[in-house]
Image (tube, helix red, strand yellow):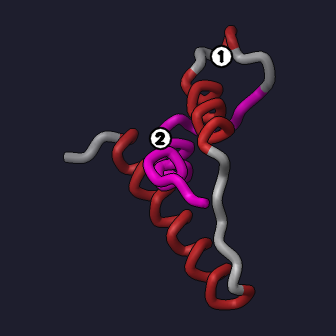
Amino acid sequence: MFTTFTLLVAVGCSLRLALNWILRRRFAVGLSVPQALAGALVVLAGLPDFLQPLSFPIPLGMTVGLLLPDLFMRRS
């Protein structure tokens, strides 16, 4: 059985791939987030509620799934 975290990562990756594919076909534009910002968003999503400086409504698994390509690949 898959855990909720792995399912959220899979959904996040699927959404990112679909969005990237649509943007590339229609507008010839790629979607990317700088690595420092991607890392900061993952850390912000992983913080407990009482330590978060601002509300971040996206769960950690979804955030990791959406930002996984930006964390592993460097684009120039």
Give the extent of the magenta segment. Answer: 55-76
Q: Position of residue 75 (x, y in %)?
A: 57, 59
Q: Position of residue 32 (x, y in %)?
A: 64, 59
Q: Which residue is mark 2?
A: 61
Nearest the camera: 33 or 49?
Answer: 33
Residue at figure coordinates x 74%, y 86% from the top left:
27
Q: Residues within 10 Å of mark 2 (few under 14, many from 20)?
A: many
- The vertical placement of 20 against 57, above or below, is below
Image side of residue 74 versus residue 51, left or right: left
**Quadrant in the rendering for residue 48:** top right
Nearest the camera: 56 or 1?
Answer: 56
Q: Residues within 10 Å of mark 1 (few under 14, many from 20)?
A: few
Instruction: Work out which quarter of the rendered image holds the C terminus and state it.
Output: bottom right
Residue at figure coordinates x 59%, y 73% from the top left:
20
Query: Sequence-wise, which precedes: disc 2 or disc 1?
Result: 1
Q: Amino acid at mark 1?
A: Asp
Which numbered dot is residue 49?
A: 1
Residue at figure coordinates x 63%, y 82% from the top left:
24
Nearest the camera: 61 or 29?
Answer: 29
Image side of residue 60 versus residue 4, left or right: right
Describe the element under mark 2 as helix, strand or loop.
helix
Q: Amino acid at mark 2?
A: Gly
Image side of residue 37 versus residue 70, left or right: right
Which numbered dot is residue 75?
A: none
Is residue 64 highlighted in magenta?
Answer: yes
- The vertical placement of 39 against 47, above or below, is below
